Image (cartoon, helix red, strand yellow):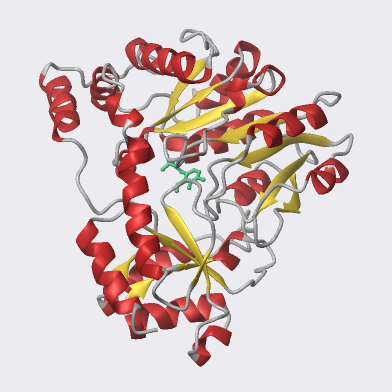
Amino acid sequence: MNPRTPAFPSKTPNMGTTIFTVMSALATEKGAVNLGQGFPDFACDPQLLDLVNDAMREGLNQYPPMTGIAPLREAMSAKMQALYGRRYDPVSEITVTAGATQAILTTILAIVHPGDEVIVLEPCYDSYVPNIELAGGVVVRVPLTPGSFRPDFDKIQAAITTKTRAILINSPHNPSGMVWTRDEMLRLQEILDPTNVLLISDEVYEHMVYAPGEHWSAARFEGLAARAFIVSSFGKTYHVTGWKIGTVAAPAPLSAEFRKVHQFNVFTVNTPMQYGLARYMADPRPYLELPAFYQRKRDLFRAGLAQTQFKLLPGEGTYFQCVDISGLSVPEKNLGEAEFCKWLTSEIGVAAIPLSAFYGNGFDQQVVRFCFAKRDETLQLALQRLARL
Ligand SMILES: Cc1ncc(COP(=O)(O)O)c(C=O)c1O
């Protein structure tokens, strides 16, 4: 016998370790304040933990229905109707997923045939491109306008061809914090109207939009909703990113295709958390109060950064704040965003994420992203350290 591991051609030869993992590891090694990866460093509501715990103790620990438990689909449907004015049938149009990441991958696997084009607006969340490639699709990258990160509709229009299967949008936007306006959503609706292009609308930060802004879900637009998979994440909304649980809302024919892939990909999502979340959602206050909760943190963080030579970019939504580093007086600002972030983590003790990580070609515009979903003490400590710059 000659035991050996057979070699095979990698399906993902260009995929490396994500910058989030790299920066988090460096932050731990150097004892830096980790404002890199996007997750809260504070606890969720203990009532939510009690409700999940209750569900486990009640014996709700076996496989739930493939599409998710009815009370959670019903709670999502009621919430979307109340907030966005559109009724999604909980039976045929809402599916519970293992987080938004799985929801997006499953959507792409369900709709993209080899050779289909899928438009992404860069900078974009890092899973989109590998997902499209795994499905055999062709990634068509359209840049958001540098500086403002607003959609450039001439470029979007020009990117649409007879091969375009879908466009992926994300509002509120990670990494920039930009929030699409009603007019921008209307413009997208107008452009897509004569086409067969499907829409994947990543709305995981839907409850983090700051006054006077508003979240213009694709669900609020008839023409968009008719072609959209709308992706939500409980992890973002309820401070439990590690739970990996979300939903996809889509018209019945789209949901049917989604579910065909979902049933042989994840099949079901953990039961007690679904019951806990469904019961917790009976009270709308936690998500209705989220904008004020994060707006206060954003304002605290922005006020501190305003005392430094970082130039603040707008922060309309999400729990991210981007800054321009070109005005700093340290020479390390010219190292390139990624090296600057490593230096900032090692020498100043605050981890950030380079925006270049969200572009396929590593486009460098001297902008880095901080996450402010942190306790006030954490933000104060980071600001103290950044004040040295
Ligand atoms: C834009 C965007 N989409 C999707 C996700 C993934 O969400 P989940 O943790 O529910 O998979 C994230 C998480 O950072 C995100 O920022």
Q: How many marks?
A: 0
Is residue 122 or residue 84 the one in the foreground? 84
* Residue farthest bottom in this picture: 331
Decide: is 360 above or below 28: above
Give the quadrant of residue 300: bottom left
Decide: is 60 above or below 201: above
Q: Position of residue 222 (x, y in %)?
A: 68, 16
Task: Please indicate, yes or no, whether residue 129 appears anywhere in the rendered image.
Answer: yes
Q: Position of residue 366 (x, y in %)?
A: 59, 74
Q: Position of residue 274 (x, y in %)?
A: 30, 23
Task: Please indicate, yes or no, whether residue 17 appears anywhere in the rendered image.
Answer: no
Dividing the image into 4 quarters, which one contains the C terminus? bottom left
Residue drawn at point x = 64 percent, y = 46 percent: 134
Give the quadrant of residue 52: top left
Position of 85 with respect to 74 (left or right) is right
Position of 103 with respect to 319 (left or right) is right
Decide: is 246 above or below 208: above
Residue drawn at point x = 37 percent, y = 55 percent: 299
Position of 374 with respect to 45 (left or right) is right
Is residue 181 or residue 280 the one in the foreground? 181
Residue drawn at point x = 64 percent, y = 18 percent: 254
Dividing the image into 4 quarters, which one contains the N terminus? bottom left
Residue drawn at point x = 59 percent, y = 15 percent: 256
Q: Position of residue 338 (x, y in %)?
A: 52, 75
